[in-house]
Image (tube, coloured by chain):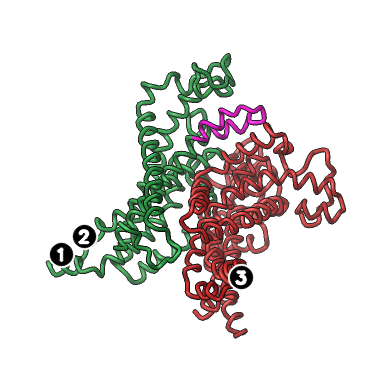
Amino acid sequence: MNSGISGYVIQRLLGTIPILIGVGIVTFVLVRVLPGDPAVFYVTGPVVTQEAVQAVREALGLDQPLYLQLFHYFGQILTGDLGRSLTTGQAVTVSLMQRLPASLELSIVAMTLAIALSIPLGIIAATRLGTWSDYAIRFAATVGVSLPASVLGILLILVFYYYVGFAPDPIGRLDPFVATPQSITGFLLIDSLLAGNLEAFRSAAAQVALPALTVALVVMGPILRITRSSMVDVLTSDYIRTCRAAGFNWWTTYVRYGLRNALLPVLTTVGLIIAYLIGANVVVEKLFAWPGVGAYSIDALLASDYAPVQGYMLLMTALFVVINTMVDVLSALVDPRVRAQ
Amino acid sequence: MISNDISKPESAGFVQHAWRSLTHNLLSLAAAIYLVSLLVLSVSAGWITPYNPVETNLQAAYLSPSAEHWFGTDQVGRDVFSRVINAAKLDFAVAGMSVLLSFLLGTFLGSAGVFYGGLFDRVVGRITDVMMTFPLFVVALAIVAALGNSVQSIVIASAVVNLPFFVRLSRAEVGRLRVLSFVEAARAGGNSEFNILLKFMIPNALPTIVVQVSTSLGWAILDVAGLSFLGLGIRPPTPEWGIMVAEAAASILAGNWWLIVFPGGALAFTVLSFNLLGDSLRDILDVRFRR
C-alpha cells in the first residue's frame, strides 16, 4: 500500500512538469508578441542608435534562432533569473521574494478566517435543510459571490475606520511609528512574536484584520456553497441514518462521521477557491497599500514593465500547480477510493 | 404538485416547498425587474439623466445626496447618478460581448468535441479542466501584456475565463442527448451527422446553456469592474462602475459614503440579480429533467 501511495505521488509530480513547461512557453511567447522590439526596449541611453540596438540584441541573444532563445530562457528560469524591473532596476526574483510573504500572510489569515466561518455555517445549513436558516445562509453565500472585493473592502474601511474608528489607517502592514521586527520568516505576525515585540504584533494583527476579512468574505461564498451541498449529500447516505438510529449525539453524527466525508469534495475544489483568492488578493493589496506580489505585478504592467509581470505569472502558476498537486495527493491519502484509481 | 424529494427524508413538506418556490420566484422576479429597468434606464440615459456624466464642476465637488444631485457629486463635481446610469450601458455591453464570445466558441468547441470524439475531444476536455480553475487575474495580466491595455483585451480575458464552463456544459449536454431516441430517429431519417448536431442536439442543449449565460453575465460584469478597478481596460474619465469604485477608494477616508454606496450597490445588485436569475432558472430546469 505504501509504495502505491509514493508511486501515485511521483506520478502526480511528474504530471506537473508538462504544465510548467507549457506555462514557460506561454510567457516566452508573450515577450515575442509584445508590441515592439525587445532590444529597443532594453537600450539605455538618450539616443536609440542602430548600433546600440544591435549590441543589445547580441547581448540578450536575440539574434539567435528561436529555439535556442527558448532554451536560454528556460535556463534562466531554472537558475532563478527572471530579469530586471525597468522601473525599479531591481532583480525580479529578489522583489518577488521580498513581497511574497506579505501576500502569503494575507492569504493565510484570510483563508483561516473563511474556513472558520464557512464550515460551521455550511453544517448548520445542511442539517437544517429547508428551514429559514438554510435559506438565509444560502442567500448570504449568493450575496457573497456577488460582491466585488473592492466594494467590500471600501465598505469595511468606511464602517470600521471612518464610522466606528476601530481599525487603524488602512495603509500597509504596520503602523509607521512601530519599530519593524527583524525579518526572519517575512511574516510580520510570526517575526514580531519571535522578537517578543508585542506592540508590533498587535499593530500587524490590527493592520491585517480588514484586508483579510475582505478576502475572507469573498472566498467564503464558494466554500460555503460546496460545504453545504456536499454535507447534504453525505447526510442523506445510509451510514448517517444508521448513526442517527444508533442514537449517536449531534457532534458524533454530523461532525465526526459526517463532516469528515463531506470535506473531501471541498478539498478537491481548492483550485477554484485559490483562483478567487488570487483575484481578491490583488484588489485588496491595491486598496490597502499592502506590499504584496499582486500589487507589484499590476504596477509593473501599468508601467509597461514586463519582466515583473512574467515573473509574477510564473510564480503564481507554479504555486497554483504545486498546491493543486498537493491537494490531489492529500485527497489520495485521505480517501481510499481516489487511491484505488 | 407535491415535493418529489422522497429520497430526502428531511425534505420540507408542501407548505415549505410552496414557500420556497414563492420566495425564490419573488426574488428572481425582483432581480429580473431590476435588470430590465436598469437596462432601459441606461439605454435612454442620454435623455433622462439630469447631467452630463463627464462634465466637471469644481464648485460642486463632494456634495452629499440632495434633491439636485440624487446620488451626490464626486471629487470633480460630476453627478454620481448620471454616471451610475451611464456606466450600466458600458458594463452591460462589455460583459455581453465577452459572454457572447465564450458562449459561441464554448458551445462550438464542446459540441464539436463530442461530435468528432477521439483525440480532439480529449484535448478539449483536458485544456478545459486546466483552464477551469485558472485565475482570471493571471489570464488578464497575460492578455493585457500581449495585446495592450484596452477594452478588447478585457473582453477577451473575461471570455477566456468563462469559456471552459460553456465547453463543459455543452459537452455534457450533447453527450447526454446523442444517445436519446429522437437523435436515433433523426439519423434513421437520413440526416447527416452535422445536421443532427446543428438542428437536433444544439437546440435541445440550449436551455441548459442559457442558464449559464445568466450566471456568466454576472461573473463577466464582476470581472470587468474588478479589472478596471485595477486600471486595466476601461479608463477614466469614462463612467464605469469599477472606475467609480476606484475613485471612491481614493477619498473614502474622508467618509464620502455616497461615492461607494451607489456605484458599488448598482454593481453588486446587478451581479446578484444575474446570479439569482441563473439559480432559479437552474431549479426550474432541474425539475423538468427529474420528471
Please name the residue that numbered disc 3 is placed on. Answer: A252
Q: Nearer the viewer, residue A6 or B179?
A: B179
**How far from the left and from the top, in percent, is residue A12?**
56, 73
Residue farthest right in this picture:
A196
Please name the residue that numbered disc 2 is placed on. Answer: B200
Task: Say if residue B286 shows up in the picture.
Answer: yes
Which residue is rendered at x = 16% and y = 68% of the image? Answer: B185
Q: Tell whether label 1 touches label 2 (CB within 8 Å).
A: yes
Chain in red on the image: A
Q: Are both tags, 3 and 1, on one chain?
A: no
- Mark 3 vs mark 2: in front: 3
Answer with left or right where residue B214 lies relative to residue A328: left
Tell me: residue B101, above or below residue B291. Answer: above
Answer with left or right where residue A158 lies relative to residue B80: right
Rendering colour (chain B): green
Q: Tell whether label 1 touches label 3 (CB within 8 Å).
A: no
User: Residues under labels 2 and 1: Cα distance?
Assistant: 10 Å
Please name the residue that numbered disc 1 is placed on. Answer: B191
**How far from the left and from the top, in percent, is residue B191?**
15, 64
User: Residues under labels 3 and 2: Cα distance?
Assistant: 51 Å
Chain where mark 2 sits = B
Chain where mark 3 sits = A
